[in-house]
Amino acid sequence: MATDAKKIPYKIYLEENEIPTSWYNMRADMKNKPAPLIHPGTLQPLKFEDMQPIFCDELIKQELDDETAYIPIPEPIQEFYKMYRPSPLTHAVFLEEALGTPAHIYYKFEGNNTSGSHKLNSAIAQAYYAKEQGLKGVTTETGAGQWGTALSMACSFFDIDCKVYMVKVSYEQKPFRREVMRTYGASVTPSPSMETNIGRAINAEHPGTTGSLGCAISEAVEVATSNEGYRYVLGSVLNQVLLHQSVIGLETKAACDKYGIKPDIIIGCAGGGSNLGGLIAPFMGEKLRGEADYRIIAVEPASCPSFTRGKFVYDFADTGKVCPMAKMYTLGHDYIPSPNHAGGLRYHGMSSILSQLYHDGLMEARTVEQTKVFEAAEQFARVEGILPAPESSHAIRAAIDEALKCKETGEEKTIIFGLTGTGYFDMTAYEAYNDGKMNDYIPTDEELAESFAKIPDIGL
Ligand SMILES: *Cc1c(COP(=O)(O)O)cnc(C)c1O
């Protein structure tokens, strides 16, 4: 699509009054709706009352709403968004030049806030609804720490308590993230802890364990359900999180419309699917309604290939099996990806919305290997200036690869990718890459088969 690229500024900032005032709910336009969360005992879809002890009321309504296309963003959230939104859509002219490609590359940068990633877009919404409900606080887990950081910022803004269960190994290895959370007033507990029944049981069974995300989820849910005035919140995967993240895509679409940019390809990294689901939302809406067509590409690590090698079945959302079951592309709730350096992409499952869209052929997925990801990250950093998060760099890799294909064919395609965050807390990963000590682990079919075998066969 030939647009007059010269007339487009390097950084496209929308005006403050162009920040979306409603989120867009893709499910409203999906013919095949994502499968509902089900109760592992009864196998029945979870109803509002079933979720009430765990989640905030308004968030449950959003989770269950497959029909309302536009959901107004409450004014206090709109006000908070003004602190760091609209985020820039940047024309990657220096990267284009370095690659010598005829392609036009744009990236939507979500790292312009202290938490350093897009996760704040949903954290602030979730903290707001907890406050509105009169709750005392929320609990959550965090692995690499991005979600915990975003949530602690959001909770301090609305003055509610925030209890974060942080996987012990990250707690010890990432003291800086931990201190950012404490600076914003959150309590951070290494998981498994001795404060919960589940934590004590796990510690007794596996003395000296360094923990896992699944175990931290179990602890956070236990604390939320056993303390009056607390609920549990989650930073990805859920329908409500994709809804909040649609602010990314709506701004991107508005910027494109303003300057006559029509993307051919939209690319995002996929861990649980929230940034990608948010970025593509309005574009997928057009695609679902038959108004336009776009190639949409999800990029995942070769070490955790949920879309590309997973099964589309009901599985537990967490290792500890305390959460409901979701129908999604999954590697099995027991799958522990090799310790790669993109912590935010190491989830065994995938958003049910994106899983359904992928299953219906409305988007593509591919995997990339770690060293190739960091190669792209450094190439990008050196010409575009921003130091990208390892997660985001999966999208950079795919965007560069598509731009290089254009160089071969001479096609002038327009590529947009999501740059989800910055990598300042990931320098041990960059160190491993710079020292040539990074490896590219790819699970074997046998390993995956072993983990698939543990997915309960419920015939759905
Ligand atoms: C958490 C995270 C991701 C992956 O999560 P999604 O829910 O798939 O978006 C990607 N990039 C960054 C910077 C993150 O913090």
Image (cartoon, rainbow, N blue to C red):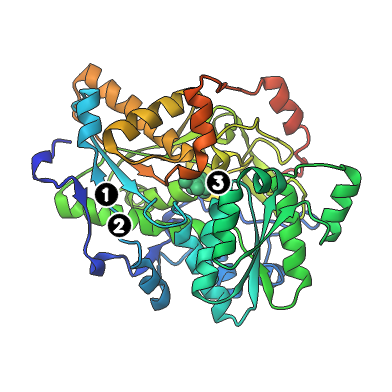
Q: Secondary structure at mark 1?
A: strand
- Mark drawn on residue 314: none
Direction from residue 393 to residue 9 in the image, left or right:
left
The percent position of residue 218, horizontal first and vertical second, equals 75, 55
- Which of these two is toward me, 195 or 50? 195
- Mark drawn on residue 272: 3
Label 1 vs 2, first from the N-terminus: 1
Q: CA distance from mark 1 to mark 2?
A: 9 Å
Question: Which of the 4 quarters of the picture holds residue 22?
Answer: bottom left
Report the residue at 37% width, 66% height from top.
Answer: 81
Is any atom of residue 460 visible in this view? no
Q: Secondary structure at mark 3?
A: loop
Which is in the foreground here, disc 1 or disc 3? 1
Label 3 vs 2, first from the N-terminus: 2
Report the residue at 44% width, 60% height from top.
Answer: 121
Instruction: Tell me the amino acid under the disc marked 3.
Output: Gly
Which is in the foreground here, disc 1 or disc 2? 1
Instruction: Tell me the amino acid under the disc marked 2.
Output: Glu
The percent position of residue 162, horizontal first and vertical second, equals 62, 68
* Image marks 1 and 2: residues in contact by CB distance under 8 Å: yes
Q: CA distance from mark 3 to mark 2?
A: 21 Å
Q: Is disc 3's CB within 8 Å of ligand 1?
A: yes
Label 1 neighbour load within 10 Å: few <14, some 14-19, many 20+: many
Quadrant placement of the N terminus: top left
Q: Secondary structure at mark 2?
A: helix
- Mark drawn on residue 89: 1
Q: For mark 2, what is the residue?
A: 251
The percent position of residue 133, horizontal first and vertical second, equals 59, 80
Please say if 389 is above or below 274.
above
Instruction: Tell me the amino acid under the disc marked 1.
Output: Leu
